[in-house]
Every structure is written in C-alpha cells, then in structure tokens.
Image (cartoon, grey):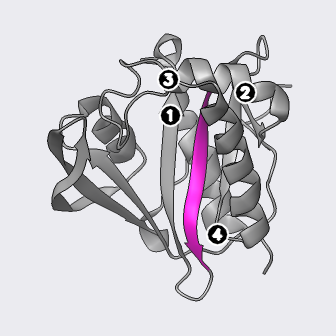
C-alpha cells in the first residue's frame, strides 16, 4: 500500500499537507523556546530550518515512511501546529505519532482532536495494529493528551535525549487497534 497525505477534518480543525507558504508559521512555532522546552532538539535559530522541515515532510511521504500534517483552526484558517504519523512499517502494521502546537493553542484540546483524527486514519485506512508515541517525562500536558487518546504508558527511555547539555528521559506509550475507542460520530441536527 502506498502512503498518501490525507486531508482530514474535525469539528474545529483542518489537517492538510504542508505547503511552502507554511515556512513562516513553522519557524515561529519551532523557534519558540517554551514550545520546544521538552523537545529532542533546541529551538530553531535559522529560518532556513523551516525549508528543510518542509523538504523532510515531502521526502517522508515520497519514501512511504510517514506523513506530517499542518493543523489549521477551521474558524479562521490559522496555522496552529502539526501532527504526524512517522516510522510507518506496513509489514509490522505500526507507526509513531507526533505533534507540536503553538502556545496559543495550548489548553483547548486541539492536540487531542488532531491526534484523534490521525489515529482514526491510521487504524481505519492504513489498518495499523499499533501506534507508539514518546513524551519527555516532564511534559505533563503531552502525557495527558496521550492518555485521553487511550495510550498506555509502556516504559521509559532513560537519558535518551541530550539538548544543550541537558539530559532527559522519555516515556514510551502504545495504543493497540483493539484498544482504540474512537468517539462516536456526532449526530447531524435536523
């Protein structure tokens, strides 16, 4: 099965393929030290990093190893972050979930909503059996998102990241298809 970038919609969000025009929004997101506080790399200091990120998105899809989707708020079209499915292995029917959202999007349930849409696509369309995610052990908000989605904490990667000489651990989470409980689709009014 070839991997193509989907366009997904939720009640409040639109998930779509990245475009070159997203470079400024990406740089603003990834150069913010608060957003990247628990990330596995330091904040970007060069705008050219956004171009490399976009190239990496296209390459990931072309190679069939994953997709990274821009997340826009449906109400105003504002770019608020991204959500990805990477390390796709069709033989093992597995992949890894990732996401990054700007500070203005925090606390509104957008990460959970976007990740839920990606998981529905992963389990229903790609027929994955397992999706894995990792989160810095200090990132309580990300752990909450994964737990709301039904992920189980399976272990810890000790000292797996060193960013600016700061060593950190990551929790490993897993979600198995038979444990996936997507919310019921809303019933149309009328």
Report the residue at 68% width, 61% height from top: 60
Label 2 – label 1 distance at C-alpha: 15 Å
Say left or right for 130 vs 182.
Answer: left
Disc on the earlier residue, 3 or 2: 2
Report the residue at 52% width, 85% height from top: 92
Q: Kindly indicate whether the residue at mark 4 contacts the one at mark 1 (C-beta within 8 angstroms).
A: no
Disc on the earlier residue, 1 or 3: 3
Q: Secondary structure under badge 1?
A: strand
Report the residue at 59% width, 71% height from top: 88
Most prominent secondary structure in the magenta stretch? strand
Q: Nearer the viewer, residue 151 or 80?
A: 80
Label placed on residue 45:
3
Task: Relative to 23, say whether 121 is above or below.
Answer: below
Label placed on residue 65:
4
The part of the image, by quadrant, that contains residue 152 is bottom left
Say left or right for 4 vs 26.
Answer: right
Task: Relative to 182, say whether 142 is above or below.
Answer: above
Label 1 – label 4 distance at C-alpha: 19 Å
The part of the image, by quadrant, that contains residue 163 is top left
Span shown in magenta? 81-89
Label 2 – label 4 distance at C-alpha: 22 Å
- In the image, which is nearer the foreground, mark 2 or mark 4? 2
Percent position of residue 190, x then y = 86, 25
Label placed on residue 23:
2
């Amino acid at each position: 099965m070839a991997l193509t970038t989907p366009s997904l919609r939720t009640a409040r969000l639109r998930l779509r393929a990245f475009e070159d025009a997203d470079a400024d929004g990406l740089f603003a997101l990834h150069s913010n030290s608060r957003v990247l506080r628990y990330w596995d790399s330091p904040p970007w200091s060069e705008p050219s990093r956004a171009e490399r990120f976009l190239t990496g998105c296209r390459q990931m899809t072309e190679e069939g190893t994953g997709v990274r989707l821009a997340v826009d708020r449906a109400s105003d079209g504002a770019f608020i972050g991204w959500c990805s499915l990477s390390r796709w292995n069709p033989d093992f029917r597995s992949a890894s979930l990732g996401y990054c959202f700007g500070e203005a999007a925090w606390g509104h349930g957008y990460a959970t909503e976007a990740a839920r849409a990606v998981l529905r696509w992963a389990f229903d369309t790609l027929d994955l059996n397992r999706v894995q995610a990792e989160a810095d052990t200090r990132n309580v908000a990300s752990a909450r998102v994964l737990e709301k989605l039904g992920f189980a904490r399976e272990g810890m990667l000790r000292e797996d990241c060193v960013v600016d000489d700061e060593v950190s651990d990551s929790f490993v989470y897993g979600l198995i298809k038979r444990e996936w409980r997507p919310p019921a689709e809303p019933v149309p009014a009328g």
